[in-house]
Amino acid sequence: MAIGFEPSEEQRAIAELARDFAREELAPFADAWDRDHIFPGETLRKAASLGFAGIYVAEEVGGAGLGRLEAAMVFEELARACPSTAAYLSIHNMVAWMIDAHGDLEQRRGFVPELCTMARFGAYCLTEPGSGSDAASLRTTARRDGEDYVLDGAKAFISGAGAADLYLVMCRTGGQGPGGISAILVEKGTRGLSFGKQEEKLGWHSQPTAMVIFEACRVPARNRIGREGEGFKIAMRGLDGGRINIAACSLGAAAECLDKALAYTKERRQFGKAIAEFQHTQFTLADMVSELEAARLMVHRAAWKLDHGAADATVAAAMAKRLATDLGFSIVDRALQLHGGYGYIRDYAIERYLRDTRVHRILEGTNEIMRLIIARRLLSEAS
C-alpha cells in the first residue's frame, strides 16, 4: 500500500479547528490554571462540543467517528497551548473509547454519550500503590455478591480523581495474573468510593490527581465492561491508543517551545549580534526541528497502524511513545536552555512546558517498559 505523508484536506481542517480552539480557549488561561491549580471543566466541555471528547468513538453514540491519526493531530495542537489539559482530555477519550469498543449496547448508550459531551468526566484506574509497571499484579478486588460486585482496594495517581464522574476500574475478580482482572465502571457518589488528598505534583496542575479508594464499594454487575477476566486485555488495548495520544501531547509541547526558542534567539543579542547567528545556536535549533519531525512521523505511523489493525500496532505505539516523549522533553529542555535565565521564570512559560512534559516519560507505561515491549518483539522475531 502506498504511504502518503501529507494530511488530507479533512485532516488539515480538523487540525486547524483544534489549533484555533487552543489559541482562543486554552492559551490565554493556561498559566493561571497552572498557577492556581484550576481544573477547567467548562473549557473542556467547549472542547467536547467540537468533538474532542470522543474523537475515535462511534458517531452512533455521540462520538466524532474519526481515527487515531486525527486524534494525534488534535492532541498535538491542544498541547501547544496546555499539555496538562490536553493530556487529561486524552485520558478521557481513552475511557470513552474503551466503553464504546468493549461495552454492550446498553452500556454504550447509557454512558458514552455523556462522556462525549463531557456532561460526565471520565477517569482510568489501573495503577495501584503496589503495582505500577507490574500492572497484572494489582490487588484491588471485586467480589461477586448476587447482582453486584463489592470492590475493595485503592488506585494511585489517578488523573481526574474527585472531579471525574465515571471511574473505569481494573480489579481482580479471579485468580492471580492478567486472566483474573476485569473492568468495572464505578460512578461518582457510589457508597464506599472515596478519594485521597490531592497530590502535590511537579506539573499537570490543571488536572486533579489523587488516590481512588474502594471500601466495600457495591457496584451493579451490569457495570462490568466485557466478560470477567477480559479487563487486562481491555486495559492494554486502551493503552495502545493512550500511548500515541500522550506522544502527540509531547509533540505539541516541543513544537511550541521550538517556536518560542526561534523567536527568542532572533531577538536576544549578545556580543553584538542575535544569538541565532552563532553556529552553536543554529546547530541546536537544527537538531531540535529534525528530532521533532522524526518523532512526529513515528507517532503518525503508529496511529495509522492502530487504525488499520496492524499486527505490530502495539510495538509501534511503544516505539512512538518512547521516542516522542523522550525527544519532546529534550526539545523543551533545550528551548529553556536557549532562553537562559529567562527560561527558568514563569513569564516565558517554557518552564511550565518542561514541568508538564516530564511525566509523559512515566505514564501510560514508563519508557523503560516501552523498551521492554520493543525488545521482546525484536527478540521473538529473531528467534
Image (cartoon, rainbow, N blue to C red):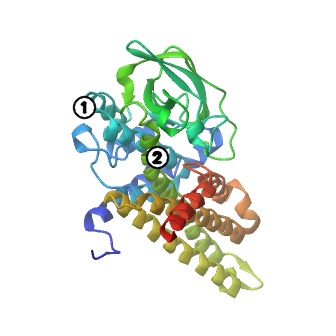
Residue at 36% x, 36% y: name it: 99
Residue in front for this viewpoint, 236 or 96? 236
Residue 193 falls in which quadrant of the image?
A: top right
In the image, residue 319 above or below residue 49: below
Q: Residue at x 75, y 86 (%)?
A: 272
Give the amino acid at mark 2.
Met
Mark 2 vs 1, N-terminal side: 1
Numbered label tally: 2
**Residue at disc 1, secondary structure:** helix
Q: Nearer the viewer, residue 142 or 60?
A: 142
Amino acid of disc 1: Leu
Residue placed most toward the observer, 122 or 268: 122
Q: Residue at x 53, y 51 (%)?
A: 82
Give the image location of residue 341, x and y in percent.
76, 64
Q: 80 or 209: which is nearer to us?
A: 209
Element type where label 2 sits in the image: helix
Q: Mark 2: few, some, or many residues within 10 Å (few <14, many ≥20)?
A: some
Q: Is residue 7 above or below residue 266?
A: above
Could you tell me if residue 212 is visible in this image?
A: no
- Residue 245 vertical placement versus 138 (above, below): below
Which residue is painted at 41% across and 15% down in the image?
Answer: 148
Distance CA(mark 2)–CA(mark 1): 22 Å
**Location of residue 180 in the rendering, given as x and y in whole percent from the top left corner:** 49, 33
How far across and how far down the image is residue 306, in percent?
37, 58
Query: Quarter of the image holding residue 275?
Result: bottom right
Q: Is residue 380 left or right of residue 286?
A: left
Look at the image and tell me in which quarter the N terminus lies: bottom left
Q: Is residue 310 left or right of residue 364?
A: left
Give the label, 2 or 1, closer to the camera: 2
Query: Residue at label 2?
Result: 236
Which residue position holds label 1?
105
In the picture, the disc for residue 345 is: none
